[in-house]
Image (cartoon, rainbow, N blue to C red):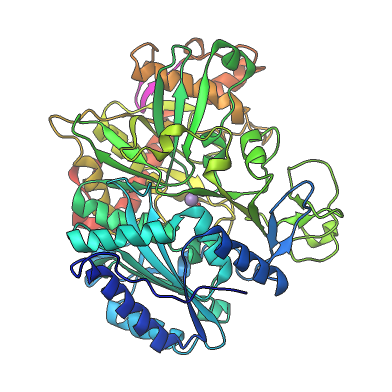
């Protein structure tokens, strides 16, 4: 393998050397600690990527998929004990414990550094250390932020190349920001270590803009630009600087008049953010001229613009989507996106080398995600948290505005979770403060995206429980603070696609049909749709939604749109009981 070991040299004057000199000093320190055999500075080029993929193919890290059906696609089988985020091993290490809050695991920074440095000592002997400069957000965007990840995993390099703007352009921005003193970069140190779950930690040091991750190669633990930087550290920075870093998709809804409203929607992991971001409207809507544009499927950075509106970018450049359940029915755009140049992780395989997962189609796979001949007695062929990593630019519905350095203006914020009971299909908050209350009270059933029990309802405020890098009490106060005199804030909604009937089946058809709910939401934003006032907010009745062509019984509609006041009183009491942990930090509007 030909890899370029050259170090970056400052390209202009001595002042510009500052950040690169700092970067070089940090890389030298890390190399002294971890003792790699080689150091490779990633430039993000095609040649570099090709060489890395070839070397991973030759050592078995990647398996080439069928080149006829899936050109340039790869399968990675991870260690079976390393398939999801590990929230119990993820820490926020602030000087004051209360700044991390009861919503995070906390460790004293000095103790955390010494524990991590103990793990990192000599861990890259025999390995290559990759230095990955990356930018979260379009390279020229004032809302974007840079980081550098050091890793000993070529799989991480290949994934970071898809998920971020990685390489030479990011390094130039780091250099420029250093010389202009306009920004600083996040430092992320990662090693696969021994992939031992007992020697695994994901540590965040927000006050130092530093991440240390050891012992896992799984996306959310190892692609440090994603959850660690773009959510946990960015949420901390965002609070200090007056913006928001959120676990939200961004989608553009274009009406038949050609006007596009951008909606940001927060759902917990594996609750359909990718599907909603890539929604294909039902035929009637398409014929009438409705279109849906994908800006992002997981993370949204929003900042008030000069016009008082919130302007948002997707800091990522790719999708790290959940494969199981993705099909021609649930998400045709995703399926089209992942036909080429995609890395699949922990999916099954057909006998002709195609990726396969439960819910894709009715073929029978030949191998499961562990590489064993498929036997249903061993469980599903694909791990329930099997993933695809793919460039967003390959998505047929990718929005032109996704690359706009200024971002897109947000008309509506939508919160949602998996709730089998109580929570109606959709409701609107009365105002911003109520919207914050609604988001803060969110709950959802847990999924396979994190290790632990699946299907248990837990509170997940703004879908940020695993990702907020500071005390939720302060976070809620930060959200409330956006309601200033000249702000033109988005309307706030809550949706629930996952309501079940007495027979245990989903009542709402979901997927493309969610367009009907989005139409009502856009109608509310435009002042064109009606709503009924209820104790939990503003709801449509059945006559206010376009339900044409849907086979929903009167009973089903009652289930979807009724407000069970006694049930909501119990919900409120549960929310208040959980808030008690935030003590004085809980802002007044969330009390009582
Ligand atoms: C993700 C997650 O991977 O939320 O996006 O776990
Ligand atoms: Mn996510």
Residue positioned 58% across, 34% down in the render = 396
Quadrant occupied by the N terminus = bottom right
Q: Which secondary structure type mostly characterizes the magenta part of the structure?
A: strand
The location of residue 472, given as percent across then percent down, is 29, 54
Q: Nearer the viewer, residue 203 or 427?
A: 203
Q: Is residue 506 left or right of residue 271?
A: right
The location of residue 3, given as percent across then percent down, is 55, 73
Q: Nearer the viewer, residue 369 or 437?
A: 369
The location of residue 21, given as percent across then percent down, is 27, 75
Q: How many marks?
A: 0
Q: Up-down: is 137 above or below 399?
A: below
The location of residue 392, given as percent across then percent down, is 53, 44
Magenta region: 533-540
Q: Nearer the viewer, residue 108 or 558?
A: 108
Displayed quadrant of residue 13: bottom left
Displayed quadrant of residue 568: top left
Farthest-out residue, front = 12
Q: Is residue 454 left or right of residue 457?
A: right
Residue positioned 54% across, 76% down in the render = 192
Q: Up-down: is 513 above or below 106?
A: above
Residue 427 visible in the picture? yes
Displayed quadrant of residue 121: bottom left
Residue positioned 65% across, 67% down in the render = 78
Quadrant occupied by the C terminus = top left
Residue 103 visible in the picture? no
Q: Up-down: is 406 above or below 530?
A: below
Farthest-out residue, left = 485
Is 291 one of the magenta-colored residues? no
Q: Is residue 340 left or right of residue 194?
A: right
Is 534 one of the magenta-colored residues? yes
């Amino acid at each position: 393998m030909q890899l370029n070991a050259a170090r970056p040299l400052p390209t202009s004057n001595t002042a510009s050397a500052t950040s690169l000199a700092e970067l070089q000093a940090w890389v030298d320190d890390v190399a002294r600690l971890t003792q790699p055999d080689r150091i490779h500075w990633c430039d993000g080029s095609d040649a570099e990527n090709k060489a890395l993929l070839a070397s991973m193919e030759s050592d078995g890290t990647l398996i080439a998929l069928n080149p006829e059906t899936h050109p340039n696609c790869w399968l990675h089988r991870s260690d079976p004990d390393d398939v999801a985020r590990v929230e119990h091993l993820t820490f926020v290490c602030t000087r004051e414990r209360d700044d991390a809050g009861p919503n995070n695991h906390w460790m004293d920074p000095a103790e955390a550094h010494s524990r991590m440095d103990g793990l990192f000592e000599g861990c890259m002997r025999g390995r290559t250390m990759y230095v990955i400069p990356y930018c979260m957000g379009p390279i020229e965007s004032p809302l974007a932020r840079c980081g550098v990840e050091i890793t000993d995993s070529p799989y991480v390099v290949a994934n970071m190349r898809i998920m971020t703007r990685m390489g030479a352009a990011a390094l130039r921005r780091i250099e420029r920001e250093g010389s202009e003193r306009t920004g600083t970069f996040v430092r992320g140190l990662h090693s696969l270590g021994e992939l031992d779950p007992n020697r695994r930690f994901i540590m965040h040091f927000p006050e130092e803009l530093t991440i240390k991750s050891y012992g896992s190669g799984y996306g959310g633990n190892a692609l440090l630009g994603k959850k660690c930087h773009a959510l946990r550290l960015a949420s901390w920075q965002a609070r200090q600087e007056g913006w928001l870093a959120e676990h939200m998709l961004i989608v553009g809804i274009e009406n038949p008049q050609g006007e596009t409203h951008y909606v940001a929607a927060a759902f917990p992991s594996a609750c359909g953010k990718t599907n909603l971001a890539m929604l294909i409207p039902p035929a009637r809507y398409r014929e009438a001229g409705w279109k849906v544009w994908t800006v992002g499927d997981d993370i949204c950075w929003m900042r008030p613009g000069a016009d008082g509106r919130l302007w948002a970018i997707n800091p990522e450049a790719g999708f790290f989507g959940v494969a199981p359940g993705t099909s021609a029915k649930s998400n045709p755009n995703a399926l089209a996106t992942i036909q080429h140049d995609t890395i699949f992780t922990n999916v099954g395989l057909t006998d002709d080398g195609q990726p396969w997962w439960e819910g894709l189609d009715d073929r029978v796979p030949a191998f499961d995600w562990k590489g064993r001949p498929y036997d249903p007695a061993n469980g599903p062929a694909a791990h329930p948290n099997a993933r695809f990593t793919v460039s967003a630019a390959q998505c047929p519905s990718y929005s032109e505005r996704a690359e706009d350095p200024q971002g897109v203006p947000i008309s509506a914020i939508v919160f949602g979770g998996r709730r089998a009971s109580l929570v109606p299909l959709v409701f609107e908050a009365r105002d911003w403060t109520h919207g914050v209350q609604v988001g803060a009270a969110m709950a959802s059933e847990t999924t396979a995206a994190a290790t632990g029990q699946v299907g248990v309802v837990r509170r997940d405020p703004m879908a940020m429980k695993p990702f907020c890098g500071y005390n939720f009490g302060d976070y809620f106060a930060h959200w409330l603070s956006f309601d200033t005199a000249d702000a033109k804030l988005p309307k706030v909604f809550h949706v629930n696609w996952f309501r079940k009937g007495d027979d245990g089946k989903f009542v709402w058809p979901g997927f493309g049909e969610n367009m009907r709910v989005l139409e009502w939401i856009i109608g509310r934003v435009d002042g064109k749709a009606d709503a009924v006032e209820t104790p939990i907010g503003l709801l449509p009745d059945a006559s206010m939604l376009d339900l044409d062509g849907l086979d929903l019984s009167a009973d089903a509609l009652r289930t979807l749109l009724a407000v069970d006041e006694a049930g909501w009183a119990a919900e409120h009491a549960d929310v208040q009981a959980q808030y008690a942990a935030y003590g004085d930090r809980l802002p007044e509007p969330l009390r009582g």
